[in-house]
Image: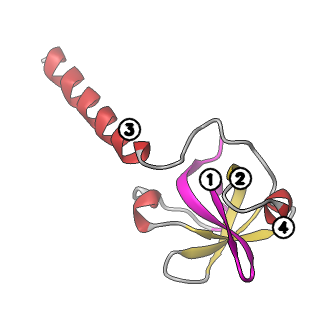
Amino acid sequence: MKKTLLSATLGLTLTAGAAVAGSNFSYDQPWVSVAQALQMDDDHDIRLTGYVVEQIGKEKYLFEDGTGTIVVEIDEDKWRNMRASSRTKLTIWGQLEEEDNGNELEVEHLELAR
């Protein structure tokens, strides 16, 4: 019984790891503010903590941290059935993309902030 449970748990862990393995996600990405992110060059991998305050498109949201607001793109599968309101503090990891209207963050991973 214990071996079966351990095998099932390990299998789920490996499956979850494989889903993230193809992305640029790393817990080691630097922690920056939204104000800093808005000034950075394209293709930087960063981490932000703040709040998703408004949905502005199918997978596009406004994200605020007290220093500014940035557009973030969060694919539906990245939410992993998580429910969040504008008062739910989140940490998000992703890659900056330079768009015509400024920097946006393509989110690779998100979780509840600690």
Q: CA distance from mark 2 to mark 4?
A: 11 Å
Extreme residue in the front direction: 42
Q: Which mark is residue 4?
A: none
* Residue 17 lies in quadrant: top left
Asked if the residue at tag 1 contacts the one at tag 2, i.e. Cβ–Cβ closer than 8 Å, the answer is yes
Q: Residue at position x 79%, y 49% from top? A: 32
Asked if the residue at tag 2 contacts the one at tag 3, i.e. Cβ–Cβ closer than 8 Å, the answer is no
As drawn, is 77 to the left or to the right of 86?
left
* Magenta span: 86-114
Q: CA distance from mark 1 to mark 4?
A: 15 Å
As drawn, is 66 to the left or to the right of 46?
right
Asked whether residue 21 is drawn in magenta, I would say: no
Residue position for label 3? 17
Q: Which mark is residue 48?
A: 2
Quadrant (top left/top right/bottom left/bottom right) for the C terminus: top right
Q: CA distance from mark 4 to mark 3?
A: 32 Å
Q: Whole-percent x and y of residue 106?
A: 58, 63
Report the amino acid beneath label 2.
Answer: Leu
Please tell me which of labels 4 and 3 falls first in the chain. 3
Q: Whole-percent x and y of residue 29?
A: 66, 41
Q: Secondary structure at mark 4?
A: loop
Q: Secondary structure at mark 3?
A: helix
Q: Main secondary structure of the magenta part?
A: strand
The foreground one among 104 and 68 is 104
Q: Nearer the viewer, mark 1 or mark 3?
A: 3
Residue position for label 4? 68
- Mark 3: give few (<14), some (14-19) or many (20+) Cα within 10 Å: few
Report the amino acid beneath label 3.
Answer: Gly
Residue position for label 1? 92
